[in-house]
Image (cartoon, rainbow, N blue to C red):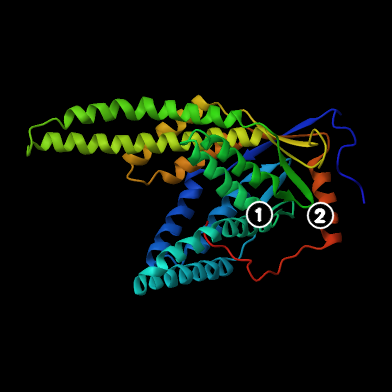
Amino acid sequence: MTDARPAEYGATERREMLTFVGTGSEYFRIWIVNLLLTLITIGLYSPWAKVRKLRYIYGSTALAGGRFDYHADPVRILWGRLIALAVFGAAGFAQAVFPPFAPLVTLLFLLGVPFLVVRARMFNMRYTSYRNVRFGFDRAYAAAYSAIYLYGFLAALTLGLLIPYAHYRRNRFIVDNTRYGTLPWRMQEGSWPFFFAYGLAFLVGSFIIFPLAGYIGLTLQAPAGSADPNVRMASSLLFAAILIGGYIASFFLSAAVLKATINASGVGGEGAARPPYRLGCDWSLNTVLFIYVTNAAAIVLSAGLLIPWAQMRVLRYQLNRTWVDTAQSLETVAAAEAEEVSAIGEELGDVFDVDIGL
């Protein structure tokens, strides 16, 4: 078969931009139906809601003329969630009936988290495709325990100073175990962008939350037992503002970390110093912050009805400023990968091939 990988990484490259065409009005119809049916069915419709949402988002995302797609079966997702619910229910029942079981149940749950994370990633990647070539995720169970618990322990040991590094290791674990067809993904060394992202998020949160926290402290210096409704109203509004500030800071952190991850990631060229297909983005974090602040205001003022518009606004900005640099046509790459995957066979049957809602 024709090798779709560039012979020389230094060859003239082309930049293929992602394009997102989803709109708030179209997504609102999906979102409101999903919400109503999920409420009416007491959550049983949520797997169908997830599939409808992802199919719309993926189908609205194009790269080099090709579209992404999501192929998961809602029934399979439902079974996975019912199994997870039964396990958690049994664990809770065991703790209630025989309290000494509580530490054992907690230990078993903690031991199972990395396994479940890997299975959830395997499920979602297996049913995601680009130009009819499926993504994949390796059975990296040992790496999952290391990424989640070893580096989490180091972060706790340093009183949180290494939280950005632990976050970097978790993201690198996810990227390094993802593949497109047979092409492995790789993330470059270097955690400093994560420390930078956490520092920026801390400053954003400080500028929003600390002044409000100080003001609410002054507001609450009313005489003990004061029933002044203005004091109570001011306290409630300021507390809500603090929560919104934390919400904005957390989403800003997610965007900053995602930007760092994308710009450090590439596809293919295992063992090479430079991947032949490299991802990149040029999101302005100032613009991202403005989008999140105005989205939060719009969601509050609309009592939540503008959530779909806010979600599409974020995706449209981020995806339309993300690209893949490559020396080959991505259509040729996808065709070659489809042939390669077909030749080696793709394992689809698995007793644990379920979605657990992570």
Q: How many marks?
A: 2
Q: Is residue 296 above or below residue 114?
A: above
- How far across and down, in percent of the image, does residue 353 sit? 64, 66
196 with respect to 344 (left or right) = left
**Quadrant of the rendered image containing residue 219:** top left
SS class of the residue under badge 2? Answer: helix
The dot on residue 142 is 1
Residue 297 in view of the camera: no
201 with respect to 229 (left or right) = right
Name the residue at 59% across, 54% down: 55
Q: Is residue 296 above or below residue 78?
A: above
Observer-side mark, 2 or 1, equals: 1
SS class of the residue under badge 1? Answer: helix
- How far across and down, in percent of the image, does residue 166 sit? 56, 40
Q: Which residue is mark 2?
A: 338
Which three-letter amino acid code belongs to the residue tagged 1? Ala
Q: Nearer the viewer, residue 238 or 36?
A: 238
**Quadrant of the rendered image containing residue 20:** top right
Name the residue at 43% across, 34% down: 249
92 with respect to 147 (left or right) = left
Residue 268 in view of the camera: yes
Q: Are marks 2 and 1 in contact (CB under 8 Å)?
A: no
260 with respect to 130 (left or right) = left
